[in-house]
């Protein structure tokens, strides 16, 4: 099954500035999440995000926060973002069936969010080159487990090409010039 821009929502999970220093390849993670957020905007795919206990752990990395929009970032206590009332309500109101996940940490909030969304009947795609954890082995095992449970693993370029579908659409020129360098 391919991604459909009219059924998709990009979910940016817990890319918080205070947590980033301990995360493996943190700058690559931030850059890839920003790439996805800009691409989603180009394709009119809604973007929503979560922040794990922002009162203590702070907010989303600033440049990513500006892209997503502070009003689309929801604080949470649950590791699975869909289980938190405010995020869950905002997510469900979007009325999209495909959840595309990026962020951190792979073995905790990303994995639990993916598995809970699956349980609720959503098609779940994890952007494997746009998630991370403190320990790369945790990401490896989380990806294996999610895939075994039915989550689809994709890359950021796969998301772009699937949302685009063809080269003769208006956004393809911007996609090829801005995103494929």
Image (cartoon, grey):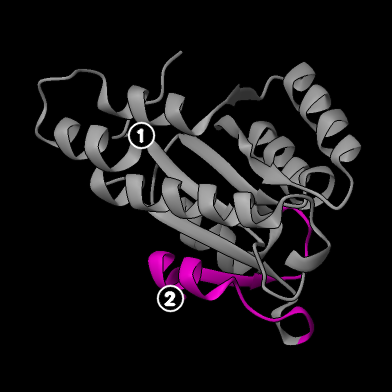
First reached walking from the N terminus: tag 1 or tag 2 = 1
The C terminus - image quarter: top left
Q: In this view, does 166 lie above or below 100?
A: above
User: Is residue 23 covered in magenta?
Assistant: no
> In what element is the residue under mark 2?
helix
Within-10-Å neighbours for mark 2: few <14, some 14–19, many 20+: few
Q: Residue at x 68, y 38 (%)?
A: 114
Within-10-Å neighbours for mark 1: few <14, some 14–19, many 20+: some
- Residue 7, by quadrant, is top left
Which stretch appears magenta?
56-80
Position of residue 94 in the picture relative to residue 73 (left or right): left
Q: Is residue 114 above or below residue 157?
A: below
Q: Which residue, as the protein is rendered here, is positioned at the far front?
A: 181
- Residue 9, by quadrant, is top left
Q: Residue at x 18, y 30 (%)?
A: 172
Q: Residue 7 carries which label?
A: 1
Q: Where is residue 60 in the image (x, y as percent from the top left)?
A: 59, 71
> In what element is the residue under mark 1?
loop
Position of residue 118 in the picture relative to residue 164 (left or right): right
All told, the count of numbered labels is 2
Q: Which of 141 and 176 is in front in this view?
A: 176
Label 1 to label 2: alpha-carbon separation? 21 Å
Q: Residue at x 52, y 53 (%)?
A: 31
Residue hosting label 2? 71
Q: Which residue is drawn at 17% across and 19% down?
A: 167
Q: Which mark is residue 96?
A: none
Q: Which residue, as the protein is rendered here, is positioned at the far bottom?
A: 55
Q: Where is residue 179 in the image (x, y as percent from the top left)?
A: 33, 39
Q: In this view, does 83 lie above or below 60?
A: above
């Amino acid at each position: 099954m391919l991604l459909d821009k009219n059924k998709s929502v990009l979910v940016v999970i817990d890319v918080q500035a205070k947590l980033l220093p301990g995360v493996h390849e943190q700058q690559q993670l931030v850059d890839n999440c920003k790439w996805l957020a800009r691409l989603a905007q180009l394709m009119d795919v809604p973007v929503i995000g979560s922040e794990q206990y922002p009162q203590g752990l702070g907010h989303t990395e600033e440049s990513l926060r500006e892209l997503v929009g502070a009003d689309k970032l929801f604080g949470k206590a649950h590791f699975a973002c869909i289980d938190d009332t405010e995020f869950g309500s905002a997510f469900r109101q979007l009325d999209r069936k495909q959840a595309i996940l990026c962020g951190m940490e792979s073995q905790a909030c990303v994995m639990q969010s993916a598995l809970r969304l699956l349980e609720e009947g959503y098609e779940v795609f994890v952007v494997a080159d746009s998630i991370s954890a403190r320990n790369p082995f945790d990401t490896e095992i989380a990806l294996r487990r999610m895939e075994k449970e039915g989550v689809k693993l994709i890359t950021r370029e796969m998301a772009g090409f699937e949302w685009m579908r063809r080269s003769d659409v208006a956004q393809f020129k911007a996609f090829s010039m801005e995103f494929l360098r």
